[in-house]
Image: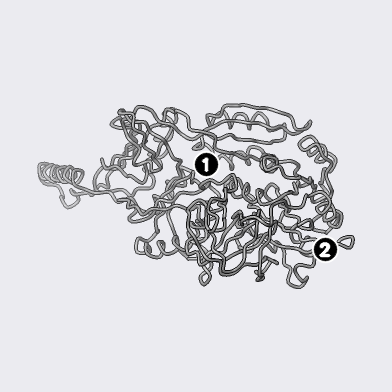
Amino acid sequence: MKNIRNFSIIAHIDHGKSTLADRMLEFTKTVRPEKLQEQFLDSMELEREKGITIKMHPVRMELDLNGNSYILNLIDTPGHVDFNYEVSRSLAACEGALLLVDASQGVEAQTITNFYLALEQNLEIIPVINKIDLPNAQIEKVEKQIYELTGERALKISAKLGWGIDELMQEIVRRIPPPTGNPNSHARALIFDAKYEDYRGVIVFVRIFDGSITPGMKIMMKSTGMVYEVVEIGYLKPEMTKATELKTGEVGYLTAAIREISEARVGDTIVDARAPETPPLPGYREPKPVVFAGIYPTVPSDYDLLSKAIGKLKLNDASLQFTAEYSPALGPGFRCGFLGMLHMEIFKERLRREFDVDIVITTPNVEYRVILDDETEVIVDNPSEFPEIFKRALEPYARVEIITPKEYLGAVQKLSLSRRGIQTRFQFLDEDTVLFEFEMPLSEIIFDFHDRLKSISRGYASFDYEIIDYRESDVVRLDFLIAGERIDALSLVVHRDEAYYTGRKIAEKLRKEIPRQLFEVSIQAAIGKKIIAKERIAPIRKDVTAKCYGGDITRKRKLLEKQKEGKKKLKRIGKVELPQEAFLNIVKAEE
């Protein structure tokens, strides 16, 4: 065990984490140069495009240094706030972490969040400044920021050009402590990731904390109590390489005929089935969706195709939740729960690319807790089910950390306060950079907060958030009625102060999108029975008197009266179809 080093690389998006992993694979000769491609561990096309790690990929490297042979296990972490829990579980499997900071960008919001996550796990943190080869690198400034954050001097590297990698590898071996644990006790291992394969079922990535695991052994999942027989074990080099035993301190994979990814939950503890009383490792919790949206096929006949596609994506994503639902406006579809907006974006992209399914997504919303008059509590994640009469409603609040250059300080503050934010902290990280902390409703963050923040700060501000609690809020359900009929897919839950503005804006948009009918169509935005905004679509007028050339005026009057009666009757019984394109445009407007 004394020659094993388990570590992770933590960084803000696009600070060079995947490129550094490439250089390490090259330096330790784990991957032959001709096989090495850029962002080697990011296997999804989507990851390469967006420059983020979505799915983790651990790798075992071997390094000869000063006459000793070392095993370095790099446990990758996803690079986005939505996957915060997965990051914490990856870090729990390590003894050390490299805190990577871009020399041209400096310390950003996620850098700080990840730093504190690593501190909570008592990891040895090695600060590293990357991209020192860039002409706009501000090495001294970033060095100062890192020193103020961590109290340590940072190593300087260029992952792209390979500068400083030799020194960094030596520091990893020197500073990161070897794993601890009892090789002679019953097996205990942490699941830090899992993936599904058609022929082998679920492949579980584990870090062994005590004892060892061998093929044929019976294991038990602590959270579910389910027992399995281990079929195969091995290391990731980075391809799966079979082994005969996974020992204390090692990182590897195992298969055990597990059919559902939800049976191998990230953060769960695997123990020897013969010793079920073995205590679990701390920190496990169920991943909880925070953003909900209705997903419908653009063409209703594609429902079966969408159903199969979501089922397949669920095989590799335990945090995705979905239930079937029906909307009178959009037909059959699903109500899905996501970890955040990026998670939803990735899901949508994968449906389109991997399964060629075109979908309509309703306006995303958060989960509310509503206390009814009889003091019972209901949890509402679909705006159309939000009750009209209730005692009080609670909505989720998040702690938001924003880092921005000081010249955008006023604009950032104004944006955050306009989103019902409460400022709780303000600090200068250096003479040019400011750290804000706000507490604000999650519903104000999930739509376009990130885009607005980037546009007012010209891309320089960064933010990170974590959900803290539920707080009482004056929220109401805003309905839209077309020709007196409520369109459930357009219902929203909004703060009472915003209701009029939102209702007016969407009613105007609907007026432009709905085709004219032979009768007058009224569009209304309502809170309960109270109409707060109204728009009118004028009817198409047919010239019924065109055939009358002269003659008595009463003939024309008779025809016009007949037309009037017909329009009245149509208004009473006529139906207005909301075209799907119109719905798509309105959802975009709401965003």
Along the viewing direction, whichever of 196 and 293 lies nearer the viewer: 196
Q: What percent of the width, then of the height, locates residue 385? A: 34, 41
Looking at the image, residue 392 lies above or below residue 297: above
Q: Give whichever of 51, 163 is nearer the camera.
A: 163
Identify the element where label 1 is drawn.
Answer: loop
Colour setting? one colour
- Which residue is labeled 1 in the image? 446
- The numbered disc on residue 69 is 2
Of the numbered discs in the image, which one, if any, rests on residue 346?
A: none
Dot 1 crowding, Cα within 10 Å, few <14, some 14–19, many 20+? some
* In front of the other: 505 or 13: 13
Q: Nearer the viewer, mark 2 or mark 1?
A: 2
Which secondary structure lies at badge 2?
A: strand
Return the x and y of residue 540 as percentages of the image width and height: 27, 47
Q: Which x, y percent locates residue 580?
A: 37, 54
Three-letter amino acid code of the residue under disc 2: Ser
Disc 2 to disc 1, how far (Cα)? Answer: 48 Å
Q: Looking at the image, can residue 576 be seen?
A: yes
Q: Are marks 2 and 1 in contact (CB under 8 Å)?
A: no
Q: Residue at x 38, y 43 (%)?
A: 382
Lateral position of residue 135 relative to residue 370, left or right = right
Q: Picture coordinates of residue 16 (x, y %)? A: 73, 53
* Amino acid type for the residue under numbered disc 1: Ile
- First in sequence, mark 2 or 1: give its number: 2
Q: Looking at the image, can residue 23 be seen? A: no
Residue drawn at x 76%, y 67% is 30
In the picture, measured across the screen, residue 377 lies left or right of residue 151, that is left
Q: Quadrant of the N terminus?
A: bottom right
374 w.r.t. 516: above or below: above
Where 479 falls versus 39 (above or below)? above
